[in-house]
């Protein structure tokens, strides 16, 4: 046995264990027991002969973070939220009355960042794990983690996502440091270059365009697309010459994105070309003595139209002419239409009858134009009164498009419009609209949501149909509403034809809503509560 032990390589022992001693007995006399004995001796020999590795260089110390730490109660709360995030989930079914702590992490982080607090050092690993798992948490989590979070992320490959702005976690060179900027632009990773372009553009838009133009001819098509798309932020008429050159790019996607951005600049040459084409298609008309809108869609898509971003081949199920018309109108400055229609307002133009069944296509294109050009007047006109049924509204019946239009309006107006819509039509079609409203929901909007939920319960509606809205309410209602909602936590008698047990579910849902609102209020109070040690 000793001789066998000394002459048996470790790899051979592993092979024997995998194949079995019946098939490779030579490496281990005595069968399985002999194999284990030989392996034990070899393990001792390997450990005894191990040569210590050369020590690696110590990492640089973590940078200082001058922001104040959270008060002790707030720190404990964050630890609880992050621990609950990694807890195994339930098997489905009813959620019960306990708040969902996982959904409160974004709100806690937002409040902490508003207060200018720094992350506790011992919670940084859990915080980075949460940011890795949830992209919706990531921006707030990384802002809260601060420079120490970036330092720690550089030591663990699983947290490498936090370093996308810089391969080392260090800040980008200042735009004034031209040599460092050019070096990073020419040698950096793609994600670093995108972040650098945004940083330079925020301080020196002309310098950012010059940086981009210098290497444009050698960039890959997919990179050129991302660079052009990044120009959405801070888009201005100064970008027009560069975007015009992009209309001749080899990549169709680059050309299309450049055309979209140019059409968002009402004074651009492309917008003027699109307006000229649209005016040949959409004109004032008459039906008897009543003014109407007459439409004659394009009969062809020529090369000049394609260069300006018009996609020639429509999606499956769409007619060519309507497809081309929609693209022309959505790229036309909305200021074109009042002059064309006798100085009528946007609301008056949208209210005109459209001949020959072109109304849906024309209004949908105007909706896309209003969103692209961020035109609140046209958004109001196309949304119409919140009490009007979506199918009979002035713009489009699509709730996705209506929520985009709603997002253009000022925050208070958005909340009032959504409250009026819910009061008139209930919650069944309001989920997307609620997503466009600022949080916490203003008083009228919050009351409209709760009243609609109460009406749905009294009507015997299926409670599971409103679980999404109830979840939104937990995150978006003003915590001050908790006491007013206490009365809804009781379980009334079920009406006839109601789903069996539905009222019990509704009662649980309202209890969870109230307890979540109260917990959110406690979280906010903990973050502003003074640390007793700091006052000593």
Image: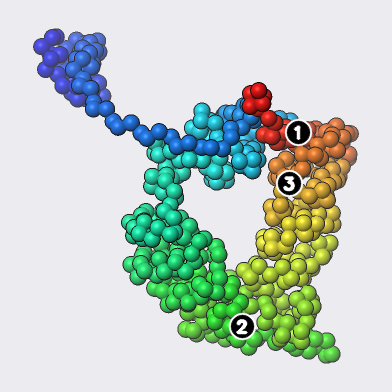
Marks 1 and 3 sit apart, C-alpha to C-alpha, by 14 Å
Crowd class of label 3 (few under 14; some 14 to 19; many from 20; radius 10 Å): some
Could you tell me if the residues under marks 1 and 3 are in contact, i.e. CB atoms within 8 Å?
A: no
Judge whether residue 267 can be spotted in this image.
Answer: yes
Residue drawn 52% across the image and 73% down it: 238
Q: Please state if 349 lies on the left or on the right of 179 as rendered.
A: right
Q: Please state if 233 lies on the left or on the right of 526 as rendered.
A: left
Of residues 195 and 48, the one nearer the viewer is 195
| Mark 3 or 2, closer to the camera | 3
Of residues 42 and 93, the one nearer the viewer is 42
Q: Please state if 51 lies on the left or on the right of 319 as rendered.
A: left
Where residue 420 sits, quadrant-wise, is: bottom right
Residue drawn 72% across the image and 33% down it: 525
Of residues 292 and 170, the one nearer the viewer is 170
Residue drawn 68% across the image and 79% down it: 335
Quick one: label 3 or label 2, which is nearer the N terminus?
2
Spot the residue most to the front.
536
Q: Which residue matches tag 3?
A: 440
Q: Which mark is residue 518?
A: 1
Residue 262, placed above or below residue 459: below
Circle 2: element type:
helix
Q: Which mark is residue 275?
A: 2
Could you tell me if the residues under marks 3 and 2 are in contact, i.e. CB atoms within 8 Å?
A: no
Q: Where does the N terminus fall, quadrant-wise?
A: top left
Residue 350, placed above or below residue 298: above
Q: Where does the C terminus fall, quadrant-wise?
A: top right
Circle 3: element type:
loop
Percent across and percent down for residue 342 are 76, 87
Marks 3 and 2 sit apart, C-alpha to C-alpha, by 41 Å
């Amino acid at each position: 046995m000793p001789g066998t032990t000394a002459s048996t390589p470790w790899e051979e022992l592993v092979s024997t264990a995998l194949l079995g001693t019946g098939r490779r007995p030579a490496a281990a006399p005595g069968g399985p027991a002999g194999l284990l004995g030989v392996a034990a001796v070899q393990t001792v020999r390997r450990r005894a002969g191990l040569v210590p590795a050369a020590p690696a260089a110590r990492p640089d110390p973590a940078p200082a973070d001058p922001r104040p730490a959270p008060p002790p109660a707030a720190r404990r709360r964050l630890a609880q939220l992050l621990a609950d995030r990694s807890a195994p989930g339930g098997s489905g079914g009813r959620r019960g009355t306990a708040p969902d702590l996982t959904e409160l992490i974004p709100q806690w982080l937002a409040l902490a960042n508003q207060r200018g607090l720094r992350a506790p050092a011992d919670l940084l690993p859990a915080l980075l794990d949460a940011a890795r798992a949830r992209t919706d948490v990531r921006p707030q989590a990384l802002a809260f983690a601060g420079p120490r979070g970036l330092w720690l992320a550089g030591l663990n490959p699983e947290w490498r996502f936090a370093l996308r702005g810089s391969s080392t976690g260090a800040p980008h060179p200042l735009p004034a440091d031209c040599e460092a900027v050019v070096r990073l632009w020419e040698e950096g990773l793609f994600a670093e270059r995108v972040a650098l372009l945004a940083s330079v553009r925020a301080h020196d838009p002309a310098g950012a365009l010059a940086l981009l133009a210098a290497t444009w001819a050698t960039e890959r098509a997919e990179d050129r697309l991302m660079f052009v798309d990044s120009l959405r932020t801070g888009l201005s008429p100064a970008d027009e010459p560069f975007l015009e050159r992009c209309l001749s790019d080899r990549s169709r996607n680059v050309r299309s994105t450049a055309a979209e951005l140019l059409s968002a600049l009402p004074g651009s040459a492309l917008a003027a070309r699109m307006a000229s084409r649209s005016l040949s298609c959409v004109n004032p008309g008459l039906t008897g003595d009543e003014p109407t809108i007459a439409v004659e869609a394009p009969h062809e898509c020529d090369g000049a139209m394609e260069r300006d971003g018009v996609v020639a081949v429509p999606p499956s199920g769409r007619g060519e002419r309507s497809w081309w018309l929609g693209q022309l109108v959505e790229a036309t400055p909305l200021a074109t239409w009042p002059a064309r229609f006798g100085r009528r307002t946007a609301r008056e133009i949208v209210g005109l009858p459209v001949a020959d069944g072109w109304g849906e296509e024309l209004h949908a294109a105007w909706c896309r134009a209003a969103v692209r050009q961020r035109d609140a007047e046209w958004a109001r006109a196309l949304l119409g009164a919140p009490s009007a049924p979506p199918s009979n509204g002035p713009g489009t019946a699509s709730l996705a498009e209506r929520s985009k239009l709603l997002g253009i309006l000022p925050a208070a107006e958005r909340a009032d419009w959504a409250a009026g819509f819910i009061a008139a039509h209930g919650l069944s079609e309001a989920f997307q609209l609620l997503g466009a409203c600022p949080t916490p929901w203003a008083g009228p909007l919050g009351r409209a949501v709760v009243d609609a939920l109460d009406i749905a319960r009294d009507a015997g509606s299926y409670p599971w149909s409103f679980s999404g809205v109830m979840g939104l309410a937990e995150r978006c209602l003003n915590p001050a509403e908790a006491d007013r909602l206490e009365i809804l936590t009781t379980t009334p008698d079920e009406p006839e034809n109601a789903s069996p047990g539905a009222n019990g579910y509704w009662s649980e849902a309202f209890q969870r809503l109230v307890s979540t609102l109260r917990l959110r209020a406690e979280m906010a109070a903990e973050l502003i509560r003074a640390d007793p040690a700091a006052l000593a």
